[in-house]
Amino acid sequence: MTSWQMVRVIAGSFILLSLALGIPGSPLFTSQWFLAFTAFVGANILQSGLTKWCLMETIMRKLGFKKGE
């Protein structure tokens, strides 16, 4: 799995988990502040798309994942 694939898996997991933890009425609801985390991840995905640089990809490469194409 390339670093870009892993970044997408991590970002998608963060978004789904933070939504489940932040939406009132959800069985996992703990706090609406988790919706701020969802926005943070979305903003980072947007920034990555505009600048073609992603901190998470850099971290994943240092952990040994192959460079994305």
Image (cartoon, grey):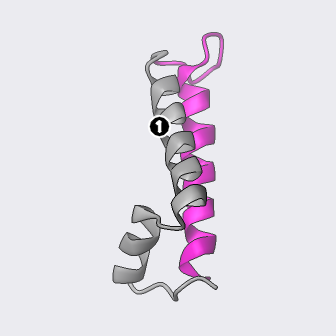
Most frequent secondary structure within the magenta stretch: helix
Task: Establish if 64 lies above or below 10.
Answer: below
**Image position, residue 24 (x, y; %):** 60, 11
Question: What residue is rendered at 39% in x and 63% in y?
Answer: 55
Question: What residue is rendered at 41% in x and 81% in y?
Answer: 61
Mark 1, residue position: 40
Front one among 38 and 52: 52
Task: Establish if 24 lies above or below 69.
Answer: above
Q: Is residue 50 magenta-colored?
A: no
Front one among 11 and 58: 58
Task: Establish if 41 lies above or below 28.
Answer: below
Element at label 1:
helix
Question: What residue is rendered at 59% in x and 41% in y?
Answer: 15
**Image position, residue 17 (x, y; %):** 57, 38
Q: Is residue 55 left or right of residue 15?
A: left
Range shown magenta? 1-30
